[in-house]
């Protein structure tokens, strides 16, 4: 039984990401411990206004997110791809919570990184309206950023990814197939 943090990273309340998150939660909860958070219900300043030079107090939902990250063995992030990137609010969640001293720490010389969230794994489930011929190529940069530049930098590895699209053309049968794939991942705790 894994401890899984499930994050619906779509700032909208109703979306394909919402359906994917609900399917994952329902299937995973039969085999694993789940803590779910929905970005649409989180209220916080998305800008890291002072960089790392000054302390910016964390809103209660950000403290809860950090507590859930520490608790989890596996993190699942469900997000749309907007303009080949994460939604701004999801990027803001990352900027505000994966802070030095919590997610990573520099050595005294500043040349080494201590990964403070090591021994955790992740899966990123991405949706996109990008046409199929461009979809995999379009997602490559975002996947690399998340797997290596963000999660891996903090010690969360390996990170797997699942890509669904183009979402705007998906028939109900295609969406059912995607949700079945998500259910299989959830039962296995992946």
Image (cartoon, rainbow, N blue to C red):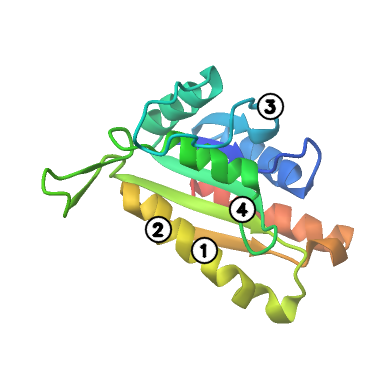
Determine the secondary structure under disc 3.
helix
Q: Residue 86 carries which label?
A: 4
Query: Label 2, label 1: how many angstroms apart (C-alpha)?
Result: 9 Å
Residue 149's mark? 2
Local packing at callout 3 (Cα closer than 10 Å; few below 14, some 14-19, many 20+) is few
Tell me what residue is drawn at x 42 percent, y 33 percent.
69
Q: Is mark 2 on a helix, strand or loop?
A: helix
Is the residue under label 4 in contact with that under label 3 (CB below 8 Å)?
A: no
181 is higher (above) or lower (below) than 108: below
Residue on which disc 1 sits = 143
Dot 1: within a 10 Å radius of its alpha carbon, few (fewer than 14), some, or many (20 or more) residues? many
Circles 2 and 1, Cβ within 8 Å, touching? The answer is no
Element type at mark 4: loop
Q: Sequence-wise, which precedes: disc 1 or disc 4?
A: 4
Measure the alpha-carbon separation of dots 1 and 4: 10 Å
Q: State the mark number for residue 41.
A: 3
Q: Which of marks 2 and 1 is nearer the N terminus?
A: 1
Q: Which of marks 1 and 3 is nearer the N terminus?
A: 3
Contact between labelled residues 3 and 2, with CB atoms less than 8 Å apart = no
Q: In this view, does 122 lie above or below 169?
A: above
Q: Distance between the residues labelled 1 and 3?
A: 25 Å
Q: Are marks 2 and 4 in contact (CB under 8 Å)?
A: no
Q: In this view, does 166 lie to the left or right of 136?
A: right
Instruction: Specify the quadrant of the image occupied by residue 157.
Output: bottom left
Residue 64 is at least partly visible in this image: yes
């Amino acid at each position: 039984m894994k401890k899984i943090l499930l994050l619906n990273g779509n700032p909208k309340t109703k979306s394909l990401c919402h359906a994917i998150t609900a399917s994952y939660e329902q299937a995973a909860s039969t085999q694993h411990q789940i803590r779910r958070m929905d970005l649409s219900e989180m209220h916080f300043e998305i800008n890291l206004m002072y960089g790392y030079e000054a302390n910016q107090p964390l809103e209660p939902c950000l403290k809860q997110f950090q507590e859930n990250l520490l608790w989890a063995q596996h993190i699942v992030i469900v997000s749309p791809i907007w303009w080949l990137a994460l939604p701004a609010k999801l990027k803001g969640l990352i900027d505000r919570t994966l802070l030095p001293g919590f997610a990573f720490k520099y050595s005294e010389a500043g040349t080494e990184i201590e990964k403070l969230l090591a021994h955790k794994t992740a899966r990123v489930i991405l949706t996109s309206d990008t046409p199929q011929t461009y979809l995999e190529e379009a997602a490559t940069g975002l996947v690399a950023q998340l797997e290596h530049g963000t999660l891996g930098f903090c010690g969360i590895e390996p990170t797997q990814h699942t890509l669904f699209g183009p979402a705007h053309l998906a028939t109900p049968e295609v969406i059912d197939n995607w949700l079945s794939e998500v259910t299989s991942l959830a039962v296995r705790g992946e």
